[in-house]
Amino acid sequence: MASSGLTSRAWSTRDIVVTAALAVAVGISFIVYDWIYILARGVLGPITQSIAEGFWLLGALLVPYVVRRPGSALFGELIAAIVEASFNPFGIGVIVAGVLEGIGAEVVFLATGYRRFSWKVMAVAGAVDALFFFVTYVVWTSGYVALTNGAPVFKLAPLTVLGFLVLEMISGGVAGWLGKAIGDALVPTGVLDGFAVAAHRKQEI
């Protein structure tokens, strides 16, 4: 049933335009956030990554909450990352990160048939997204884990890495709530009239 519903929910021109507009706005905010993050990391150290990660997932959370079309989490995060790549301290590698940051949330929303966007679902989407990104990207690029003779070896104490992961998932969960809060705040402006987020905001579980 979910599969049938998904295949029938084709993208409209307006879906694409709104997705692009939201993702570009998020990408611009990423650029500012990147430089703030660099300053914060100089003070707080590696733990900053885990605390700050949630905001970088916003394209994969806000866009699908508003557009509610299969692929919008991945599409939204990718566009945001491409915009971010135009001027940031990390280079074009943020595009690869953007793809990975879009996958985790996409999986959760697909599992719900892209029909459930409660506070709980949004928090779970953010937390799972953060988990997926941490395991596939952060532990390797941050040097927490490395391959030695083909096997992963912890470069930091396992409990420290676990602590970073838990913080990152909490940050992702909070970002899920932030995405929903921003989407809800846009509803009264009328710019989202015609989207499910406006029509069913009060009916969501």
Image: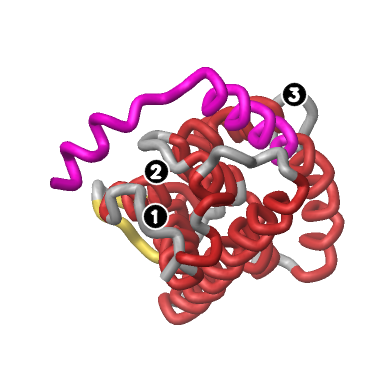
**Residue 32 vs residue 19, the one in the foreground:** 19
Residue 63 in view: yes
Q: Secondary structure at mark 1?
A: helix
Q: Which residue is mark 2?
A: 103
**Residue 18 vs residue 99, the one in the foreground:** 18
- The amino acid type, in three-letter code, at marker 2 is Ile
Where residue 13 appears, as percent x and y from the top left, is 52, 18
Where residue 172 appears, as percent x and y from the top left, is 54, 64
- The quadrant of the image that shows the C terminus is bottom left
Tell me the tag on residue 132. 1
Q: CA distance from mark 3 to mark 1?
A: 25 Å
Instruction: Please identify the quarter of the rendering in which residue 30 is found.
Output: top right
Q: Residue 151 vs residue 156: left or right?
A: left
Magenta stretch prevailing secondary structure: helix
Nearer-N-terminus badge (2/1): 2
Q: Residue furthest top?
A: 13
Q: Which residue is mark 3?
A: 86
- The amino acid type, in three-letter code, at marker 1 is Phe
- The amino acid type, in three-letter code, at marker 3 is Ser
Q: CA distance from mark 2 to mark 3?
A: 22 Å
User: Is residue 89 depicted above or below 114 in this figure?
Assistant: above
User: Looking at the image, which residue is at 56% across and 24% down?
Assistant: 14
Q: How is the image coloured?
A: secondary structure
